[in-house]
Amino acid sequence: MSTISIENLRYTWPGSDLPALDIAGFRIDQAETVFLRGASGSGKSTLLGLLAGTLTAQSGSLQILGTELASLSPRKRDRFRADHIGIVFQQFNLIPFLTVAGNLRLAARFSGKGRRYIGDQSAHLLESLNLDPALLQRRADRLSVGQQQRVAIARALINEPELLLADEPTSALDADARDAFMSLLMSIRNISNCTMIFASHDRSLAKYFDTEVELATLNAAQAREPDLV
């Protein structure tokens, strides 16, 4: 069974006459790591939103782990996301006034797996990310940028998801910080062995992944857009 299976998927933003995404077919195998490349505005974040179930396509099929996301109610999609999908955001999106432990506990709370991960699991994740477990009691807004990055990875992995989505998390980093972040992310991904999709415009990152996919080759909607002058 593939982790992701897409057929004839079309998504149009409200108020627009043209689809943002029109994908005839796309499959990703279990444990595969995929670099999804595209320019700003090409639809990378839209596709990740559909994969995460925060957006719903107007037509077509999108299955994650054999489950058709459009067939789930909003509440069941939220639960499915919490149980099976981890997300690393561009701006990390940590709750600033919560401690590190509080941020991890909140992520675990939405999952049926949650009670198993409070405590020892949080400390273990921080250690695997080269963070002192003592940081569990520090507020998120008192962490360095590098520490916030690692906590964001820990939060995405706290429920042991089968699918990890990353949306341009290195876009604001210099080259050294970017490479350190990627090495760490791929190292812990290899331990969890989850399927991973990493969206970015930075082609130099493709070397870290099993497969590179250019969104423009998938998205028939882009071919129909008029030339800009």
Image: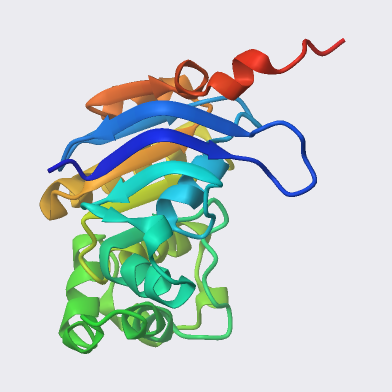
Q: Decide: is 225 above or below 164.
A: above
Note whether 202 is above or below 169 in the view shown: above
Q: Position of residue 128 (x, y in %)?
A: 19, 62
Q: Residue at x 62, y 20 (%)?
A: 222
Task: State which quadrant residue 173 falls in.
Answer: top right
Q: How many dots with numbers?
A: 0
Q: Position of residue 153 (x, y in %)?
A: 35, 59
Image side of residue 44 versus residue 26, left or right: right
- Asked if residue 173 can be seen in this view, the reply is no
Please say whether residue 184 is visible from this viewpoint: yes
Using the image as rendered, state which of residue 227 and residue 147 is in the foreground.
227
The residue depicted at 49 percent of the width and 41 percent of the height is 47
Coloration of the structure image: rainbow
- Residue 74: image x %, image y %? 48, 71
Q: Is residue 117 above or below residue 207?
A: below
Looking at the picture, how far across and down is residue 28, in whole percent?
25, 35
Toward the viewer: 106 or 132?
Answer: 106
Image-quadrant location for residue 72: bottom left
**The N terminus lies in quadrant:** top left
What quarter of the picture does the C terminus occupy?
top right
> Which residue is depicted at the point 59% across and 42% down?
172
The residue shown at (32%, 68%) is 80
